[in-house]
Image (cartoon, rainbow, N blue to C red):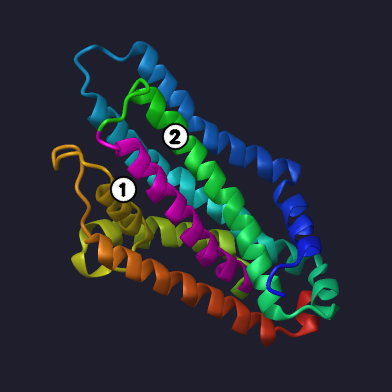
Amino acid sequence: MLFNPVLAGLTVRQALAKRRWMIVLLLAALPVVMATLIHLYGTVDDEPLQIVAIPIMTLIYTVVVPVIALILASSSFGAEIEDGTAIYLLAKPISRTEIVLTKLVVTAVICMTLAALTTLGAGVSLVRGLDPTGLVLGLTAGAALGAFLYTAIFLALGLITKRGMLIGLTYLVVWEGALGSFFKGTRVLSVRQYMLAVADAISTVNAEVFVALLAPKTAYIMSGVVAVAAVTLCIRKLRTFEVGQAG
């Protein structure tokens, strides 16, 4: 069995912890609120597609999606290790693969749902319900992919180190922000570039709106590599995890 319903329920309750959930909801609501304000007060001369592309790529792709995944995924294992409850989980006759996959699926579904809803909400509002180029659909698909990959990465990070939040933020700012955007060699290892490649592949907007820096095929292949690597790392780390480390 690769999915444990009981553990899934515990993971959901952990993700819905009041303080954590309030921060996540505020992050997800921010682009929708901004889009609504632009929709209400934007001038008639504004270019709709550029209004959609710029805020979504800069705010949702750069901040909202990765930070939501960081908050929820890094604490999925990290919180249990810190408070000592991981000892009870590791002592149960549940395979490490089952634990990792269950936590990944539950956390990823939550993150992907929030990513899709915030992108759709902001995008539909900005294009006023019309999306002939498929831009909103493409950006939503890219956001969902990014949410899944970031979840896998930060799940592993939370298991490896107790400073998952700090290291995760550093990774987002340095690697995904600076290096992934400006240095060609690092783009192939940038989740944000995979998101943009998927959005570009689905939409039919011209290069004046936005253009991806990676080919879709490269993004698909590397997304699979990153996901498998993160899950494998989680499983291997959990298998070598000493029960005493959870206390």
Find residue 239 and name its label: none
Q: Does the magenta stretch include residue 146?
A: yes
Q: Give the quarter of the image for residue 99.
A: bottom right
- Asked if one can make out residue 13 in the rendered structure from this viewpoint, the answer is yes
Where is residue 79 shown, x and y percent of the image?
72, 61
Which residue of the protein is positioned furthest toward the bottom in this rendering?
240
Q: Give the quarter of the image for residue 35.
A: top left
Q: Do the residues labelled 2 and 1 touch (CB within 8 Å)?
A: no
- Asked if one can make out residue 187 in the rendered structure from this viewpoint, the answer is no
User: What amino acid is found at the position of numbered circle 1 in the picture?
Assistant: Ala
Q: Going 60% across and 84% down the picture, which residue do you hit?
A: 236
Q: Going 79% across and 82% down the picture, which residue do you hit?
A: 243
Where does label 2 land, which residue? 120
Disc 2 element:
helix
Q: How many marks?
A: 2
Mark 2 → mark 1, Cα distance in angstroms: 13 Å
In the image, the segment drawn in magenta is 133-159
Left or right side of 94 for 44 = left
Disc 1 element:
helix
Q: In this view, does 182 lie above or below 45?
A: below
Q: Is residue 119 above or below residue 85?
A: above
Where does label 1 land, which residue? 199
User: What amino acid is found at the position of numbered circle 2 in the picture?
Assistant: Leu
Q: Going 23% across and 12% down the picture, which residue do you hit?
A: 44
Where is residue 12 shown, x and y percent of the image?
73, 52
User: How would you rate the neighbour count of disc 1 (Cα within 10 Å): few for under 14, some for 14-19, many for 20 or more?
Assistant: many
What secondary structure is the magenta-colored segment mainly? Answer: helix
Where is residue 198 shown, x and y percent of the image?
32, 53
User: How would you rate the neighbour count of disc 2 (Cα within 10 Å): few for under 14, some for 14-19, many for 20 or more?
Assistant: many
